[in-house]
Image (spheres, grey):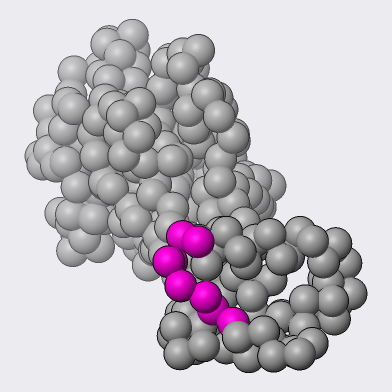
Amino acid sequence: MHARVLRYLDEVVRRGSIRKAAEVLHVAPTAINRQILDLEAELGAPLFERIQRRLRLTPLGEMVLAHVRQTLREHDALRERIAAYNAGQQGIVTVATTAGLAGSLLPALVHDFRRRHPGIAVRVLDLPVAEIVAALAEGDAELGLGYDLAPTPAFVTLAAGEWPIGAVVAPGHPLAEQSSALLAECVGYPLILPVATMSIRGLLDDAFVRAAIPVRAAVEAGSTVLMRRLVMLGAGIALLNPLDAIEELEAGTLVFVPLRDPALPLQRLTLFARARGPLDSAASLMAERIGAALKALSGGGAGH
């Protein structure tokens, strides 16, 4: 049964006549009468007893009316939920990103987003860069956040920023007092390096080769959390970008010393989505929040 005939029936019962219901609903009485006759024909029995000029529900009509009013309540509730979803108050958004960003940048960002939009659930997938792209392409995530992604027509860039690579050291380390450093200075200390599958490692290896600096890692790790912990324990220095250690840098438990080697490029962080079709409200709000956070961090000096 369609919403129109349900509302017609409900209003006829409330007003006691088709004519009065038609006045309230601003439709022709014949239109309401036709809908009710069609419904009675479909059910195979009358819904009303016509007594003089008033309509009285039959026992079947009472049963149908109970169903009608329950359906209308559920319909109205659904419309409210849809309106809330479209307004960005409810929904779910999935962000595919690297394990490093999931463990550094995103905790505070997701917490802040959930405070602002408690009706929106957030899923974070920590994946290798190639799998981030695949997750978006296959529809498993609405947003992707990763470093040094090759541009492709299948995706649209929503926000981007460039971040320097530097030495992450403990506060009392000799490099901690310097405003910048060279790779040649870093190799004098035990190096904690990202594993080869992380995009930053390729940039570091290329820079070491161009500078003709032989390098031997004391530790290689695929987890920036592990790398940060090792630095705090005094195991060496890590070569990362400031977003990889944002919480510790803000707390003062670690220090970031940017590297000034001309052979070492900046890391480009990109927030992207599928090019086809607009983002829904939940994903749009999350994209705005991530973009604003990256802009604020860059403007505040965290990225330069």
Identify whether 264 is placed above or below 158. Answer: above
Q: Which of the pair 131/245 is nearer the observer?
A: 131
Res 106 quadrant in image = bottom left
In percent of the image, x 54 and y 54: which residue is there? Answer: 282
Residue 60 drawn in magenta: no
User: Residue placed at 42% from the left, 37% from the top?
Assistant: 144
Q: Residue at x 27, y 11 (%)?
A: 209
Whether residue 56 is visible: yes
Residues 298 and 15: in front is 15
Percent from the top left, x then y, of residue 284? 59, 47
Is 64 above or below relative to 296?
Answer: below
Q: Residue at x 71, y 66 (%)?
A: 33
Residue 44 lies in the magenta stretch: yes
For residue 191, above or below residue 245: above
Q: Is residue 200 above or below residue 120?
A: above
Could you say which quadrant of the image residue 149 lies in? top left
Q: Quadrant of the C terminus?
A: top right
Task: Name the side, left or right, on which 287 lies relative to 202.
Answer: right
Viewer-closest of 227 and 9: 9
Q: Give the magenta part as a residue range.
A: 41-48
